[in-house]
Amino acid sequence: MLSRTADHLFWMARYMERAENTARMLDINLTALLLPGNADDEARTHRAMLRISELDTAFDARHEKTTRSNVLQFLVADPTNPSSIYSCLQAARENARAVRGTLTTEWWETVNDTWLQFYELLRGDTLSTHPESLFEWVKFRSHLSRGVRVGTALQDDALFFTQLGTFLERADNTARILDVRFVEVDQADSRSAARQLEDFYYWTSILSSVSALEIYRKVYRDVVTPARVVELLILNQQMPRSLLASMEGVCVNLAMLRTDASREVERTAGKLRAELLYADLRQIFSVGVHTFLTQFLARVYELGNQVARTYLMLPVG
């Protein structure tokens, strides 16, 4: 497969997954704001989300105040923010259009129609009046795109590059979703930190946002605790959006794309997967969850660079 075609497929999948995960992170944020708190708590929650997404500097360049409406506008509808849902869905559509002949008709129409419908939704008042409905819609369209892809695409390199992009982006974003609260805790006083970690409603919303609440109940059959949420979302191989499951998906698809030049990138991915497979909660908490996730994000970023150098021969976007 031509490296340019592989690049479009890889980034089409990453952008679609990124749009979904931005919607998931915003959904957590809105849920957290329903809990008792003051203006300072609200601003801190917004700042934590921007910071963990590495968008706080870009946000400050566009907005003077960290308000709910400004954050929603920036992360959902701002075309100048390359990580906004608007930009991600548009980029997914443009990458799909560039390789239109590689996609099945159903696959292309799903990606294209998602962008067109989203654009129309933003022209209305859904974002300001019912943002949670918009986030659910984005998640549904991402699910639909994956389902159509798996159900109609030939199982060849085009599918494997797309799956690789999906799992790599999912690993990155699950870590960021989980880390939002631990960033807050690192910067809070001890009393506030204890309250945040023990916040049952917040951790329940985290599980719901990654479609894991029912899975949690099946696995643990007990009250929601931060330690078990961390275990489920990092170490549980059967949890579809966990870090371990995501890295498993990365390794499986790298194996399907194996070439004479891919040994190093497979080794990097396999090492990261193995470390997650044999890690335990004591190790993670001894290092610190925020530190563990920060290190994981740095390594996933470097893995993405290796994928680009090995297969795509194009700069990382």
Image: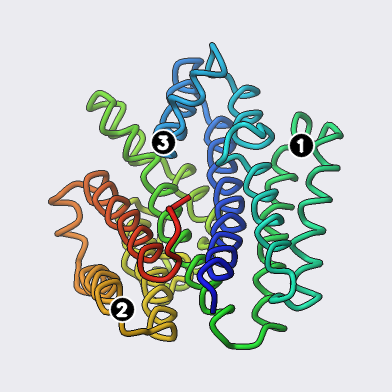
Task: Confirm or deny contact between disc 1 and disc 2 (CB under 8 A).
Answer: no
Asked whether, in this view, residue 50 is left or right of residue 227, the answer is right
Q: Measured from the top left, where is residue 217 in percent x and y? A: 47, 67
Label 1: state its secondary structure: loop
Question: Where 34 falls versus 238 (above or below)?
Answer: above
In the rendered image, which quarter is residue 188 located in?
A: top left
Circle 3 Cα neighbour tier, 10 Å, few/some/many (<14 / 14–19 / ≥20)? few
Circle 1 Cα neighbour tier, 10 Å, few/some/many (<14 / 14–19 / ≥20)? few
**Measured Cα–Cα span from mark 1 to mark 3:** 26 Å
Residue farthest to the top, as pictured: 64
Marks 1 and 3, the one that precedes in the sequence: 3
Type of amino acid at the residue the image marks with label 3: Glu
Type of amino acid at the residue the image marks with label 1: His
Q: Residue at x 78, y 59 (%)?
A: 112
In the rendered image, which residue does mark 2 sit on?
A: 261
Marks 1 and 2, the one that precedes in the sequence: 1
In the rendered image, which residue does mark 3 sit on?
A: 54
Circle 2 Cα neighbour tier, 10 Å, few/some/many (<14 / 14–19 / ≥20)? few
Q: Measured from the top left, where is residue 146 in percent x and y? A: 65, 71
In the rendered image, which residue does mark 1 sit on?
A: 130
Q: Residue at x 76, y 37 (%)?
A: 130
